Image: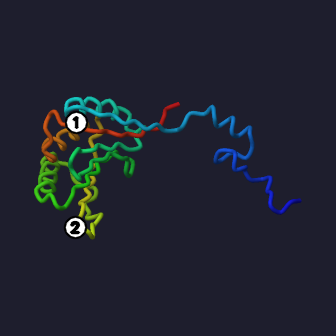
Amino acid sequence: MNPFVDFQKRSIDLPFGCKDLADALANANREPDSRDRWKLLSGLQETERYLAGLLLQPAALLYLDISIIHTPHCLKLAPLRDELCILLFIDGSDKGRLPRVRKFLHDAEISPAVDVMGNISVIDATSTRILIYPLPVVAPDAAELITRVLREGFALSEEAPLYISSNEKTVA
């Protein structure tokens, strides 16, 4: 037996996870278990409709990222502890934003699951505040809350363009 050849391992010519050609052919016909989507939405009304459609099956959603253009802030949706949550990353150098977002969510009677300091930047001595709040279970209510956070908490105009990236489990 050749000490440099191990017939139990896959070849470098085969895709990861395949030990022989039969494995490679079987994997080629299989659909991936998730799919990425990027979408540009023009305005908060379109965003609310799009989110309501996505949130009809919250168990299928792995994550959703809403890019707020021209700001360092970030808004994500992700399942945490079997609940779909909104994750807000608020730049600490924007002094009025954090109290405004907290007040809005407090007035909506939603308590934070997490409120921590993170991502401290050595270069400009700023930090990011990470807020995590559970979303309502009903899709239209959750979509409305998200757009209200964007409108009232982040002061976005009704026509603000938003880039949304989502990843969902494919349902067989």
- Judging from the image, what secondary structure is the residue with disc 2 in? loop
State the colouring used for the structure image: rainbow
The image shows residue 169 at horizontal and vertical percentages of: 47, 38
Q: Dividing the picture into quarters, in which one does residue 68 lie?
A: top left
Q: Which residue shows up at 21% across the image and 65% down it?
A: 126
Q: Residues within 10 Å of mark 1 (few under 14, many from 20)?
A: some
Q: Position of residue 101 (x, y in %)?
A: 16, 51
Q: Residue 172 at x, y = what percent?
A: 53, 30
Residue that numbered label 2 is attached to: 124
Point out the tag, 2 or 1, that comes first from the N-terminus.
2
Q: Is residue 153 left or right of residue 115?
A: left
Q: Quadrant of the N terminus?
A: bottom right
Report the front residue among 172 and 30.
Answer: 30
Q: Which mark is residue 114?
A: none
Which is more toward the observer, 161 or 139? 161
* Residue at figure coordinates x 23%, y 44% from the top left: 69
Looking at the rendered structure, the secondary structure element under dot 1 is strand
Query: What residue type is disc 1 on?
Result: Pro
Q: Is residue 1 above or below residue 66?
A: below
Name, please, the residue furthest toward the right. 1
What residue is pinned by disc 1? 161
Quarter-wise, where is residue 2 in the image?
bottom right
- Residue positioned 38% across, 34% down in the render: 57
Q: Where's residue 50, x and y in %?
A: 29, 31
Mark 2: give few (<14), some (14-19) or many (20+) Cα within 10 Å: few
- Amino acid, disc 2: Asp
Mark 2–mark 1 Cα distance, whole angstroms, equals 28 Å
